[in-house]
Amino acid sequence: MEYESFYSFEQEPFSNVPDPRFFYSGPEHAKPFLRIMFSAQRMKGLVVLIGEVGTGKTTLSRKVLSSLLKEKEYLPGILVLTRDEYPPFWLTSKVAQLLQVKDNDTDDNKLQLIAKRLYEIKKEGRKPVIIIDEANKFHSDATLEELRSILNIEDEERKLITFILCGMPSLKEMLNKNESLIQRIAYLITLSSLSKISTENYVKYRLKVAGAEGEVFTQEAFEEIFRWSRGRPRLINTICDNSLFEGVLLQKKPITGEIVDLATESLGLKSQSENK
């Protein structure tokens, strides 16, 4: 059963797919976004974005990527880490691919090819920026050394490439073990959960993007959404999505606090809270 037609939405408002169109530029996310964009513009070299599960790191990184792609001066790329272990020279090879290094040479020579390509890119007047999502999965010292080696490629004017590492708080602990990389961090940005007011505005913004008109959630519903999500965007999306489904089953408009409570119960959030 679809709720989009019942609530007159043009599209699904609370998907957890990181769609840049749904990026809410509230106080908790606007400053990190601007700082990352500034770092890319000034070629700061290494930026680290950390945040707990569900705080919106991936959506923010996709918003950054989308913004960079719109500007001709940048050559942006993204790597999403899906496992904990990577073979030697994996990162170097992936960076070479993103930089469009054409020569398929040996792993030992790839760093030189990357350096050559970075100087070419600079002469073209462009700025390479690579986002690495789930960077906390980099557990190998050898991989971190590859990252450091690539960051060492610079001239007397500026860094020739900027990396944006996004990950869980354990990313910071991991980097702390590599003194050389720690010294290269231009900005360490911590993404926090949304405040009560921002949570309400976040929900309203996503509803607006989805084409909603009029009141969809009551004020009491917003109170319950914040109570159970604690301002974490991913959980806000899940609660709102389930609340809308409960609402269409009950044929209720708008969504009340009682309906949100039904949704949180079906998600098992209440039992989790009781067990703490």
Image (tube, helix red, strand yellow):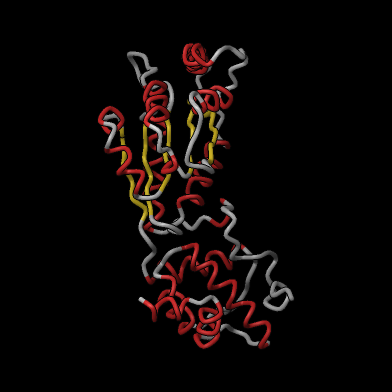
The percent coordinates of residue 33 (x first, y second) are 42, 46
Q: Where is residue 55 in the image (x, y as percent from the top left)?
A: 43, 58
Name the spot of residue 57 as percent of width and height, x first: 45, 51
Q: Where is residue 188 in the image (x, y as percent from the top left)?
A: 31, 42
168 relative position to 211: left or right = left
Residue 138's place in the image compared with 4, above or below, is above
Whether residue 215 is situated above or below residue 59 in the rendered picture: below
Task: Give whichever of 107, 6 is nearer the camera.
Answer: 107
Picture quadrant of residue 179: top left
What residue is drawn where x is 40% and y is 40%? 36
Q: How many marks?
A: 0
Q: Is residue 176 above or below residue 88?
A: below
Determine the residue positioned at 54% across, 22% down. Answer: 96
Q: On the rendered structure, is 10 left or right of 93?
A: right
Residue occupying image coordinates x 47% and y 15%? 111
Which residue appears at 54% of the width and 23% of the height?
93
20 in relation to 156, above or below: below
Q: Quadrant of residue 105?
A: top right
Image quarter of the C terminus:
bottom left
Q: Quadrant of the N terminus?
A: bottom right
